[in-house]
Amino acid sequence: MSEPVSRWSAAETIGKGVRAAPALRIGFVTTLGLALVGAAGRVVIPILVQQAVDRGLSPSGVKVETVIRMGVIAFVVICIATWAQRTAVYRLGRRSEEALYGLRVRLFEHIHRLSIADHSEERKGALVARVTSDVETLAQFFQWGGLAWLLDGTLMLLVAGVMLAYDWVLAVVAFIVAAPLAFVLQRVQRHLSKAYDSARSKNANVMTQISEVVSGAETLRAYDAGDRYATHVKKASHERSNSFIRAGTIGAFLFPSGEVFGVLTVSAVVVTGLVRGPDSGLTAGAMVGFLFLTYRFLEPIAEFTEVLDQTQTAVAGMRRVLGVLEIPIGPPEPAVPMTLPVGALAVTIDRVDFSYRSRGDTDEPPVLVDLTAHIPAGQQVAVVGETGSGKTTLGRLIARLADPTAGTVLVGGVPLTRVSNVDLRDRLTVVPQEPFLFEGTIAANLLFARPNLTIADLEAAIDALDLRDWLDTLPEGIDTEVGERGAQLSAGERQLVALIRASLVDPDVLVLDEATSSVDALTEVRLARALERLASGRTTIAIAHRLSTAARADRVLVLDHGRLVEDGTHTELVQAGGTYTRMYDAWVAATSAG
Amino acid sequence: MVQAFRLVRALLQHQKRTFFIAVGGASVFAACTVGSAIVVRKVIDDVITPRFEDGEVSVSTVVSVLGTLILLGLVRAVGVVVRRTWAGRTTWRVTERLSAEVVDRLAEQPVPWHRRQTTGDLITRAGVDAEAATAVLGPLPFASGVVVLVFLSSAWLLITDLPLGIAAVLVFPLLIALNVGYQRRVDRYYNTAQDELGRLSAAVHESFDGVAGVKSFGAEHRETERLAVIADRLRTARLGAVRLRSVFEALLDGIPSVVNIGLLVAGAFRVRSGAMTVGELTSFIYLFTLLVFPLRLIGFTLSELPHSLAGWTRIRSLLDQPVEADPALSLRHGDDNSVVLDDVHYSHDGEREVLRGVNARIDGGRTVAVVGATGAGKTTLLHLVAGLIATDRGSVTVPDGGAHIVFQEAFMLAGTVRDNVSLGAEVAPDAVELALQVAEADFVHQLAEGLDTEIGERGVGLSGGQRQRLALARALVRRPSVLLLDDTTSALDPSTEAKVIANLRAALSTTTVIAVASRPSTISLADDVLYLVDGEVVAHGLHDELMNAVPAYRELIEAFEHDRAAMDAALAEEAT
C-alpha cells in the first residue's frame, strides 16, 4: 500500500494533504495577510530608532515633539500589529484543529470501510498508528512548526525587505556573512536528529526492561534473579543517560551558533558602513536601525532549523495518512444490487481462493485454496481445522468482510458481490471470536446492533435466549459497565453479549466464530443453551474450536492448510481415519483419566 | 516555594558540581548579555556617531570596540554551550539515580508487597515519574541565569539613567507575572488535551480490533460517529490552548515594543537635557529587546515545578515504604527431600482464609498432583512451599536447596533463549542442554540461532506451549530438590505432556514434584493425589483410592470429563 504513495514529493504530499483537509484552505490568504501585518509590528522599533536618531535626536538639536509624534504613530502601529498577530495565530490554530479533526474522522470512516483483508494482524498496529501518532505529528507541526512558518517566515521576509530598502549594499553584506549559518545549522541538526533517534530507542529499551522487572517480579523472585535484572536495568538506564547527554551536547551548539554569526554579521555591517561613510547617503540612524534589523533577522534562524526537521516529520506523517486514504475501501457496493430471496438462505462456496494483502511486494501465502461447498438453507454446519487452516477466514468471506481472490460466494443463490451491504447485514450476522465490545453499558453495546430498539426489546431478546439468570448476577443488570474492550466481563460473558446482539438482528444466516478461551462450567452451559436457541431455524456456520460443538452439528467440514479435506457427519468422520479422526483421538486422550 | 526548594536540594544531592557548572555558564551568559548592551552603546557613541556626524573615527577604536563585541559574543556562546551541556548532564544523571533507586527497591521487595501494587503504577514510577521529577532541573540553571541577568540589567539600567531605569525595571515583574499566569492556565488545557488523546488512542485500538464486529453489523458509520465525539473533545481542549496562546504570543511581542516606545520618548527628554547620550538610549532599548526571551523561561520553569513535585512525591512514597521481610526466611529446612506442611493457615490481607490448617507430608522423590476446584487454594499452597509468601500460622519444611516453581503463566523476558533459561545465573552449557531435553524443549534447536535466538517483543514469538517448556527448563537447570508445577503442562498437548512427565521421573528420580493439575491425563501420571476443598486437605492418597472413597473427588474428575460425555450423548442420539 505504501508503493505509489512513498514516491510523492513533499510538495505533492502537501498539496494532496490540503485537499484531504479542506479546512486548512478556508481564509488562508486573510490569515497570511494578518500575519504580515503582525510581523510589521516587529520592525517598528528598528525603524523608530532610525527615524528618531536621524530626525529627532541629532546633536544639532533634540526635537522632542518630533520624537513624540513618531512614538504615537509607532504605538498605533504596534497595537494594530499585536491584534493582527493574535488573530492570525488564532485563525491558523482553529483551522488546523478543524482540519485535523476532519482528517481523523475521515480516517476512522475509511479504515472501518476497508476490506477485512487490509485488517490483518500485522497491519492493525499500523492502522492505529495512522490515526493516532501520525495525525499527532501533524498536530505538533501546526502547534509549533506551522506557527513558526507563519510568524517567523513573514518576519524574515519583511525584515529582509526593509534591510534592502534601507541600503542594499549593507543588506547584501549581512546576507552573505550570515549565509553559512544556515549550512552549519543544517549539519548540526542532522547530527542532532540522529543522536535523538538513538536516545529515544535507548529510552524505549529502558521502559521495556522496567516493565519486565515489574511484571515478572514473581518469576524473578522465585529464581533469585531480581538483583541481576535490576543491574541490567541500571546499565540500560546509564546508557540512556549517556545517549541523551550526547544529544544534549550537540543541541547545545545549535542556539549559540546563531549568536556567533550575529556578532560577526553586525561587525561586518558596521565596518562596511564605516568604509562607505556619510557620503554614500547612509545616516547614523540607518546604521543603528540596521543593527537592530540584523539581530531580528537572525533571531528566528536557529528556531527554523528545528522547524524544518519537524516539517519533514509532519510531511512523512501526512504521506502515511494519505497512503491509508488511498487504499480502496472494502468489498465494493454493487452498481445494480439484487435482492436476497425471502426466507431461509442457502450458502454456496464456489472454487474460492483467498490470500491476505501483504505489507510489501511479495504476496502472502494463500489462506484458502479452491474451496467448494454447498450449505443448504437451515443446515447447521461446523467448520474445524487446526490453527491457520483458514477456517476463520472462510467465515469472513461468507459474511463478505472481504471478497475472495478468486471464485464466488453465493447466499440464497445470489453472488455476494451483487448484494447490497444493507440487505446483507440485515440477513446475515457474524459473532466473531473475540466479540467487539466498547466502553459503555451492556445496553449500549447491544443497541450497537440495532440503535432504534428499546430497552424492552433488549430485555425480550435476553429472555428469548434464556439468559435472564445471567443478567441478574450482574451488579447493575443491563446497565452494567463493561469497561474498555469489555474487560469487566469474563470471556464467556462477552460471548453471551455477542449472542444477544446477534439475535437482535434476527438473521437468516449466522456465522459463529467460537471463542478459543476457556470458559467456566456455568457460563459454558449458558452459552450452549443460548446458542442452541439462536441457531434453531437459521443456516448456521460455526467455526468450531471445540469438538463437542462439531459433534452437535448436522455436518462437519474439515479444513487443512486452506483446503477442504473432509466433509460429513461427526460419526462418519470419526470412523474415516483421516484428519478428523486424529483430532478426535488427541482430544479424547486429553479428557480421560488413564 | 519551600517545597520547591526542598525538591531541588534533594535532587541535587549528588550532582551539585555539574549543576553549579551549568549555573556558572548561565551567569556568564547573563553577564555577557549586559556587556554586549554596553558595547552596543560604544559602537554607537564611539564609532558610528563620530564617523557619521564628525566624519572621522580612528581605526584602533573601531578594532577595539568591534573586537570586544565579537569576543563578548563568543564568550556568551560558550556560556550557553556550557550551561546546556551541564544542565543536560545534571538532569540525566539525577534521573538515572532515581530510576536506579526505584528499581533496586523493586528487586528488594518480596512477592506479597508486589501483589499489593498495580503493575502499571510501578512502571510509571520507575520510568515516567523519575523523568518528571527531574524535568525542573533542565531549565533551572537558565532560570538562575535569568535572575542574574535581571539583576545585572537592572543595575546597568539604573546606573545609566536613574529615572528611565526605574521605569524599565518596573516592567520586569509585569512580564514575569504575565508569563507565569499564562503557563499555569495553558498547562491546564494541555493536560486535558493529553488525557483526551489517551482516551482517543484507547478507543481507536478498541474499535480497530473489533472491526469485524463493526462491519458485520454494518455499523461503520455509527462507529465513526462514536469516535468523532472523542476526537471533538480533543479538538475543544486544543482550541482552548490556541486561544490563550494567540493572545499571549501577541502580548509578549507587543508589550516590550510599547515599553520601548515609551523609553524612546522619555529618553528624548533625557538626551535633550544632556543626561544621557544617544548611544546609551539605544543600548537601553537593545538590552530590553534581549530580555524578552529569557523572561519567558521563568514562566516555563515554574510551570515544570508542579509536575516535578508530583513525580517526586510519588517516587518518595514508594521509597519510603520499608522493605518487607522475605517470606523465604520463614521456611524451615529438613534433612531429606520431603516437604512437610504443618497446620498451615494463610489468608490474603487477613480476611477470608485461603488455607485453613493444611497438614501434609510429601516424601522425597514422590510426584503429587494437587487437585481441587477453582479457589480451593492449590496455587497458594505452591507459593507457600516456594517461599514466595509466608504462612499466617503453621510451618512449611522444605529441603535445604528450597523449591523451584514453574508458574501457570510462563513469563519470558526480552533476551535470548539462553538468557531466559539461565535468568542471568552462571549455568553450564551441558546443564542447559539437559534441561531442554527433559522439558521436551528441543524446538529451540530449530530456531534460526538456536539458544542465541532473541525472543519476546523484538525477537521470535513462541507459542504458549513452547513458553511453558522453556519455563520448565528454567527450573530444571537449577537441579531442584523440589519442583513445583502450577498447571504448567496445561498448554501442552497430551502426548507431549506425558513425555515431559516421563522425562522428569527418569531424570529427577530423587526430586519431589508437586503439581497442580486440572486435566485427568495429568492427574493419572502422579503417584499420589492431594485433594483440596476450600483450603483444607480432604484426602491424600492414590487416585484410584480417592475415586472410590471420596465421592466429591469423583464428581470433580467426572466434571472434567463432562465435555466428552456430552459428545458421547450426542453420538448416541445420532446412532439411534
Image (tube, coloured by chain):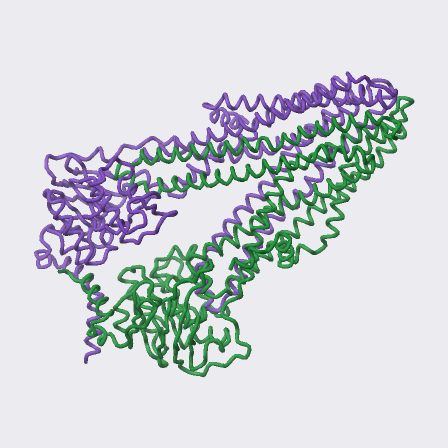
Chain colours: A green, B purple
Q: Is residue B344 left or right of residue B193?
A: left
Total numbered labels placed on residues in the image: 0
Considering depth in this image, is A10 or B141 the residue closer to the camera? A10
Of all residues, the one furthest to the right in this rendering is A60
Q: Give x and y (percent) for residue B234.
A: 57, 51
Residue at 64 percent across and 33 percent down: it is B296
- Report which quarter residue A476 is drawn in: bottom left
Q: Give x and y (percent) for residue B510.
A: 11, 42
For the question of whether residue A459 can be seen, the reply is no
Considering depth in this image, is B195 or A34 the residue closer to the camera? A34
- Report which quarter residue A22 is drawn in: bottom right
Q: Give x and y (percent) for residue A188.
A: 58, 35
- Report which quarter residue A381 is drawn in: bottom left
Whether residue A521 is situated above or below residue B166 in the rendered picture: below
Quadrant assignment for the C terminus of chain A: bottom left
Considering depth in this image, is B291 or A459 the residue closer to the camera? B291
For the question of whether residue B50 can be seen, the reply is yes
Considering depth in this image, is B147 or B63 the residue closer to the camera? B63
Whether residue B562 is situated above or below residue A88 in the rendered picture: below
Q: Is residue A106 left or right of residue B350?
A: right
Q: Give x and y (percent) for residue A125.
A: 46, 54
